[in-house]
Amino acid sequence: MTDEQLKSEKIVGIIGLGDMGAMYAERFSKAGWKVVGADREDKFVETKAKFAGQAFEVLRSGHHVSRVSDYIIYSVEAKNIGAIVQTYAPSTKVGAVVGGQTSCKAPEIQAFEEAVPEDVDIISVHSLHGPKVDPTGQPLVIIKQRASDENVKFVESLVSCLNSKVVHLSAAEHDKITADTQAVTHAAFLSMGCAWKEINQYPWETPRWVGGMENAKMNISLRIYANKWHVYAGLAITNPSAHGQVQQYAQSATDLFTLMIQGKKKELQERLYEAKNFVFRHNPDHKSLLLDDAILSEFSLSKTPPEGRLQPNSHLSLIAIVDSWHHLGIVPYDHIICSTPLFRIFLGVTEYLFCTPGLLEDCIDVAVSDPSFRHDDLEFTFAARNWANIIARGDYELYKKTFEETQRFFEPKIAHANAIGNEMIKTILQRVKEREQ
Ligand SMILES: NC(=O)C1=CN([C@@H]2O[C@H](COP(=O)(O)OP(=O)(O)OC[C@H]3O[C@@H](n4cnc5c(N)ncnc54)[C@H](OP(=O)(O)O)[C@@H]3O)[C@@H](O)[C@H]2O)C=CC1
Ligand SMILES: O=C(O)C(=O)Cc1ccc(O)cc1
């Protein structure tokens, strides 16, 4: 079938009209597909009113969506995917295709394999960006679990209106890469947020955190705290590979902080240079960095421009990620094809620190000789260990509580940070494109 035939004959169904589901429903329907969607049945009237002006139709429940749709995308909380698939799977139209948008694929695929009838194909998707980011040029993973080539073409044709970069992976490959990239990135920025809350300081209000790298840390941290806790909890807790990665990050932060307070400069240097040589070995001349301080300096949350010399910082959150990539044998550049904007920014900032001549040396000097960031680094280390524990225990309630307490602390600044973060992401994407050319 041609794309036009598919568009006129197929019906696309979305179960879960939250941030990502609504984004898909809006974009697919605007591109000319017939789209139906449902959120929780008890919210039907409210959901129908919310999307009244849209080109897609809101139905009463996932059963109603499943009965009529040729491709059904479950865009629901990861923790509940098993139960939700079990509920609606028996209503799936004969010969249809099902898939999900959750961030970790093992539980999603298992739910489909267990519950959907055998005549139904399984093709999952994952847009590697948040709902407010323009999907153009961002990676979109397609996972053909069990499907005819014709149905894969149907899904490709559908998602082509997003203009994303399609990457075909197995569920296992997807989960390994996203554990390496997303889970640790989130752990780092979640920990920064908790540390600022514990020392009771908005980082943009003090001259201690000034400069491009600091802007990136604040914007990304607040961007994560602007999202829903379950997105990050589900992604890390349901992905077993993520537990070890987050644990290693906490261990690296602990080890490096210990070397700092012991004043063991030589050991710290050796450890970080070994990590640098492993992670950044493809860019030994430090050419064409993803980001630089001048670019990042534009994106400040502070009202007053910085004055004088920037205060050097031990950058524990950045040196710990390079150390943990080294310990886990991860070369982050290998994952760029399947990376999120936040991961690319994190990589860009660490690359800037490690590959700009003189910066890492300054950072090591400060780390062992200047105690002014010790309290912050101590809180950061506690926070990293706490997140690793919560994730390892699979404690959704404690995750929610810890996340929401910090979210409340940053509440007054979240909208502003999101606006600046969007601009920063656009600039960085442009930069990545130029570098690719
Ligand atoms: N947000 C992001 O940045 C990204 C998220 N993802 C993944 O996509 C999925 C959706 O995330 P997101 O849209 O952000 O989350 P949301 O919480 O915004 O959306 C999930 C929606 O599903 C609804 N829901 C719950 N139970 C049912 C049900 N039985 N039938 C129909 N709808 C139901 C929820 O209602 P209620 O809230 O009332 O329970 C909610 O409106 C998650 O698995 C997430 O990990 C993937 C990429 C990016
Ligand atoms: O870019 C990020 O890491 C985000 O925070 C947005 C996000 C969250 C969950 C996903 O599965 C994909 C993207």
Image: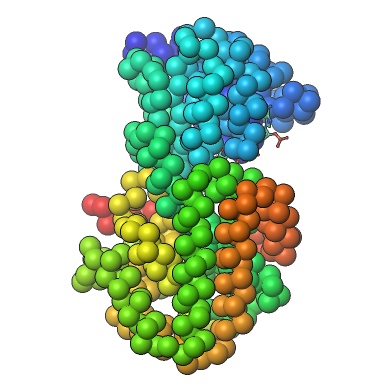
Quadrant including the N terminus: top left
Residue 267 locus on image (x, y percent): 37, 83
Residue closer to the observer: 383 or 280: 383
The residue positioned 31% from the left and 76% from the top of the image is 273
Q: How many marks?
A: 0
Residue 252 locus on image (x, y percent): 46, 69
Relative placement, left or right, of 285 versus 358 is: left
Relative placement, left or right, of 259 versus 336 is: right
Is residue 158 something one can see in this rendering? Answer: no
Q: How is the image coloured?
A: rainbow
Relative placement, left or right, of 214 versus 275 is: right
Residue 92 locus on image (x, y percent): 57, 13
Q: Quadrant of residue 83?
A: top right
The residue positioned 66% from the left and 15% from the top of the image is 63
Residue closer to the observer: 255 or 220: 255
Is residue 137 something one can see in this rendering? Answer: yes
Q: Quadrant of residue 387?
A: bottom right
Q: Quadrant of ligand 1?
A: top right
